[in-house]
Amino acid sequence: MSSGYFNNIKEATVSLFNGFAITLSNMFRKPVTLQYPDKTPRSVTDLMPERSRSWLKVEMPICTACLNCEKACPIDCIKITTEKDPSGRVMSGFDIDMAKCMYCGLCTEPCPTGAIHFIPEFERASFSLDQMISRFVPEGEKVVPYKVPKKDKDEEKNSAKEEAEDKAAEAEPDA
Amino acid sequence: MGIQTEEMMLNMGPQHPSTHGVIRFVVKSDGEVMTEAVPDVGYLHRSIEKIGEICEYNGFMPYTDRADYLSAMNANQGYAMVVEKLLGLEIPERAEYLRVIAAELNRIISHILSLGAVAMDIGAATPFVLALKEREKVNDLMEALCGQRLTYSYVRIGGVSYDMPPGFIERSLKFLADFEPFMDEFENLVPENKIFIERTAGVGVITREDAIAYNLVGPNLRASGVDWDLRRDMTYSVYPKLQFEVPVGVGSQGVVGDSFDRFIVRIKEIKQSISLLKQCFAQIPEGDFLGEIPRVMKPAVGECYVRTESSRGDMGYYLISDGSKNAFRVRIRTGSFTSMSIIEKISRGMMLADLVTFIASLDVVAPEIDR
Amino acid sequence: MENFAIHIHESYLYGLPLSVVNLIVMFGAAFVVLLGFVAPFAGLLSFIERRIAARIQCRIGPNRVGPQGLLQFLADGVKSLFKEDLIPKVADKPLFIIAPYLVFLGMFTSFVVLPFSSQWIVADLNVGILYLFATAAITVVGLVMAGWGSGSKWSMLGGMRSAAQIISYEIPTGLAALTAILLAGSLSLQEIIAAQGPHPWQWYFFDNPFTFIAFFILFVALVAEGNRAPFDLPEAETELVSGYNTEYSGMRFLFFFFAEWAHLYVLGAILTTLFLGGWQVPESLLASVGAESIAARILELVFFQLKIYVLVFLVVQLRWTVPRVRMDQMMDMCWKYLVPIGFFCVAGVAIWMMLFPDGVSFVKYLLIAFSSAMVLYYFYKVYRNFKDSRAELELNPFV
Amino acid sequence: MNFNNQVSRIKEKFADLEIKSEESQAGDPYVWVPANKITEVLTFLRDDEELAFDCLSNLTGVDAPPDDLDVVYHMFSYNKQHSLTLKVRVSKSKPDVASVEKLYPTANWQEREAYDLIGVNFTGHSDLRRIMLPDDWVGHPLRKDYQEEEEYRGIDTTRPNLLEM
């Protein structure tokens, strides 16, 4: 009983002593705070990894209007409207409701050309839900879907992607 | 004796600092000592099971993240396994390893947060922040692996969605090397502290019988002295190829099954996860990360119940397929749900401060209770 | 004060009766003290506490307002002033309104007797130490009032806890202080300081083993009395939401915090005065600036402040190191540990004084050596911990 | 003990009952048990030395259109390390199943959930209230024929789809 009494005092003192040593040693360490957004060493967008699922973007010049992304979306936040035109099938709308999107990335996987993809950008908060809708086809315009050139079947997928990337790079300045 | 006292009814929650989310406890107390604490859940009910009946099989994967957002990877894995079992899919070995790596990293994240939260609820703010600091590093790894920091949706039916990014193994090993001394420091700071021991030892004791009868799972079950781990005893994925120990509560400071044991079991599990990760990194073979999957997933008519060891223990997915593109019924049986149900029984006659300790030590996650 | 009032009366406000001038001067003084002394002072302590807490947790802490965030407290103060003053419907209004001022009053009247230097003291009462403990106990009335008046169950629990806590811990406080009083033979703070010397071996802290222990008892008891962590049960945020101040907002809320930080300072001052030699400065140093000059007084003030801030630092660090104790454990600690040991120390000091009226220098040096060894070992441990774990966070390692 | 042995052992004991085992095309096999005998069967499963199912891992309700409801019991044994699935079918018009709360305390909450979401009435349950949904909610959402109310206490249950505006 009495030994327990003094043991308690001893244990309390020793553990307090150890705890103090740890907390004081923490004081000499470099703080890890990242002072977002103004005092970061580099812009935070640059620090996002390549795969970061932050904001959806569609490269319209290489979109084939296959509707795979619309089908894959579990919450139907993508809506593509296509029309018959004298020149063939055209897209009159490609809207994504980013307020609804849950950033799962399921839409990017079945895309044959990689047209729909995430960009590492996240500072897109807004005060109204309407502004959260990304409209990739401007009002009143029509976009002709991209056609994957027919080539050797084995190479098709790879070359299509490469070509698509080239085309996307070309189209970048306009967008 | 002679003095008339009146029972007081306290509404603890749905917004209360120690409920970690929206849970409500109807507490009847006589001063500091409670007579009863009845949990009231459902504030976060989002009908995930109903959504599972509407979504296609692949489309339900992001929802499993939301079922248990602190260990989304483990939840993903369980769901993928149950669908694969119904479809009869074989998945590549590299994918299995990637899943285990992700799941164990996730276990570290989940446990370290739980440890910090216990310390925080007992009144020490520093361990919580230090724990979050470490969690941040794993989050960075996860973000590099799958692109998200919390709701990963990394696992796909038939494999995983991405391979490891270049340099992932080296970075992870470097993190683990830094993480081990941190765990020692954390142990020095929290569970060896006399006040912490006094506050947790002998508090909220769950006996072995109660733990099984109330179907507690995972660390809570092991802390009560049941030597049971699904990864070892009903093994799945690549766990049979890995060496690890299953920590069990021994009552080192009080009674077996008290809050202190639950805390210590989680610390030991983190250490086991570190060793598991190192083995995985050493063993991981080359190969595909996504197997051959059917274009349209239509499992045969049937049903399946698969249990996996999530951070909060045995997470069961019960799936009934009627042969169509959607599941007929998805049921997610989670650890937090059963943990909550035992609180009413154990908390009788506890002190108010002990209830907070007890709830925190059970590591319940509100969305996992309600789904 | 009265002379000042007469002076004002004679030179500026001759037309008014003296009593009115007296009143004006009193209010004016209170206003100046509040704005010019208390607010910046409590604010500064709040800043220090926040920065220490941040660094302990590997954060930066407030650093935006003013240089290094030094003016953060002003921003917080102004924000609090502009906040809506909410009074719950079910609150007992008079009690609810008075309570924060009572708490504040209890803490700040203690400043009257604090000896900032050998001559800078508002009133050198001959019962100074008693006065200190008495005023500190007024806060309990305020806290219980706040708890009851809020009309919230959480607040009431907090108020009850604080009452039980502060009243219990008065006893070990008194007992531990008694050891220094016995040695000095006086209740006046200036005399207690004068009885000690500038050098560590002249402090009561190292006088004999009993005072050595008594210092720690007083430390713990004062921390508990100030509702500081690990004894912050009345405002335990994870249990009682925020305890007695749950329902408060704006300026009233701020007053509770003024009182808390003021107590932090008073705690340091009491310990320094009783055991660490107060404002005592070595003779040689004093002589070099002129013993009667204003510089000497400032030097004394600096020494006093330094000792206080070391203690304040320890209390703040304690808060961010250990978890909170439970109610019954806190009572256990008081009645089973601090009170018996306190009695033991008082008796020990009395016997020691009978046996060795002039003190034993061997014991003093032994105690100093022991303390220094512990401090050295402590810093060695800190160094080793610092070396052991690499805590640097790399911002996204893959870029 | 594998599934067939388990079933034959149960059949031995309850020879007079209609106990059918069913192996689905994919996944796990299960056993049908008459609804009025579920307590007896579970008591036997728990107390029998060979079976020793000490843990009720999962209890849930499943809608079986058009007019039946199933209750599924996933049993597990920590001693023997085997599991078994039991199923009970009741009609929607009289969805009464005896509560097994006394045998397995964990059933308390799980039965409350099944009652709440599927609408199985567990007779003999000590505290059969809704658990997830508010007490005044109409209907049982996990039934296939469930129609969501337009609004709940003046709150719309749907949000307009921005993409269709």
Image: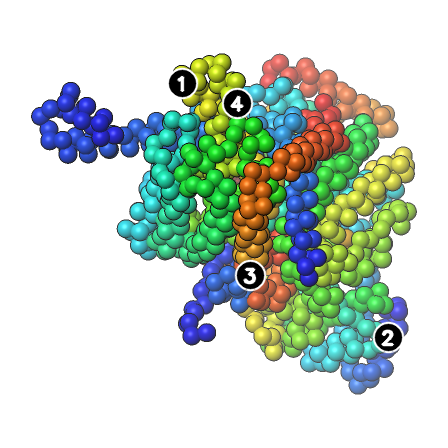
Query: Mark 1 sits on what residue?
Result: C292
Which dot marks residue D50? 2
Towards the viewer: C358 or C263: C358
Q: Amino acid at mark 3?
A: Met
Q: Is residue B129 above or below residue B198?
A: above
Gap in angstroms between the C-alphas marked 1 and 3? 59 Å
* Residue A175, image x, y percentages: 60, 18
Q: Secondary structure at mark 3?
A: loop
Residue at mark 1 shares a chain with residue at mark 4: yes
Question: On what subunit does the disc labeled 2 rest?
Answer: D
In the visual, does B288 lie left or right of B25? right
Q: Amino acid at mark 4?
A: Pro
Q: Amino acid at mark 1?
A: Glu
1 vs 3, front mark: 1
Residue at mark 1 shares a chain with residue at mark 3: no
Towards the viewer: C31 or D18: C31
In the visual, does C380 lie left or right of C318? right
* Residue B235, image x, y percentages: 85, 54
- Residue visible at 85% across and 54% down in the picture: B232
Query: Mark 4 sits on what residue?
Result: C282
